[in-house]
Amino acid sequence: MTPPATPTPPIPPDREQLLTALATAARERAAALGLSRDDLARRVHDTPEPTSQQLSDIARMLDGRRLGLLAKGGLKLLDVLGLQELRPVWGPVDVPPSARAANLSAATDLRLGTDTSIRGRLTYAAARRAVDIGMTREDLARRAGLADLDREPPPPDHTLRAAATKFLTGKTSLLTTNGLEVLRALGLRELQPVWRTPRKGRSGSA
């Protein structure tokens, strides 16, 4: 019988704390599900005979070494273990109302909303948050420190827009150092891991 999803406490938006907490949760989930590192390597790498390097990658991610757990392979491992999303818990942000915040098109919102991967859900939540609180992409880039505001001349608006857009459309991961700054600028207080019953078959993308 598959064990129920294990609650994981909310995690502050700090990359090292996030990595440590997710690695601990991943090891606990693997043990509860009776999945060895060989089993995980088979599912993550979609192969019946994982190589020594693939097994080493799994061990490195589960041990929280370096940042592999927050990269593509690590997110796939978390998906295999049943992580559905890292749900943002938002706090108040002082933002002057601006209609220009809604410059993410309906088509972009729709496309983002269909990506149910861990990274896709977080990207969509951030994009919706920016629109909901009325924060322009220029303002977001300034608050998140995505450009050098002290240079002469200062960066133009189109440069600021482009810097923020990369994160709000999923081109650049929000689980990077700068990505977490973007989330904090949007008012992120915590990331709540949400687990589902893991699929018995091979994992999809994360």
Image (spheres, grey):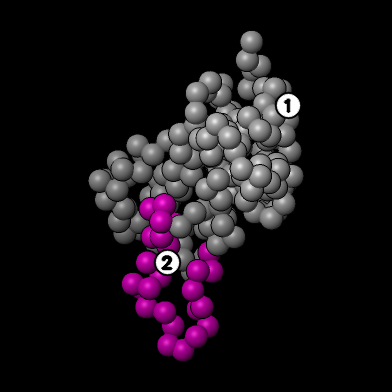
Disc 1 from disc 2: Cα separation: 41 Å
Q: Residues within 10 Å of mark 2 (few under 14, many from 20)?
A: many
* Residue lying at 67% horizontally and 26% vertically, measured from the top left: 35
**Viewer-proximal residue among 189 and 167:** 167
Which residue lies under the disc numbered 2?
Answer: 163
Residue extent of the magenta highlight: 144-171
The mark found on residue 75 in the picture is none
State the image coordinates of residue 25 (x, y, percent, origin top left): 70, 35
Q: Is residue 163 magenta?
A: yes
Q: How many marks?
A: 2
In terms of secondary structure, where does tag 1 sit?
helix
Q: Is residue 21 left or right of residue 5?
A: right
Kind of residue sitting beneath label 2? Ala
Amino acid bearing label 1:
Ala
**Camera-nearest residue between 98 and 127:** 127
Which quarter of the image is occupied by the N terminus? top right
Judge whether residue 161 is colored magenta: yes
Examine the rendering and report whether any part of residue 97 can be seen: no
Residue beneath label 1, please?
Answer: 31
Q: Which residue: 66% across, 33% down? A: 38
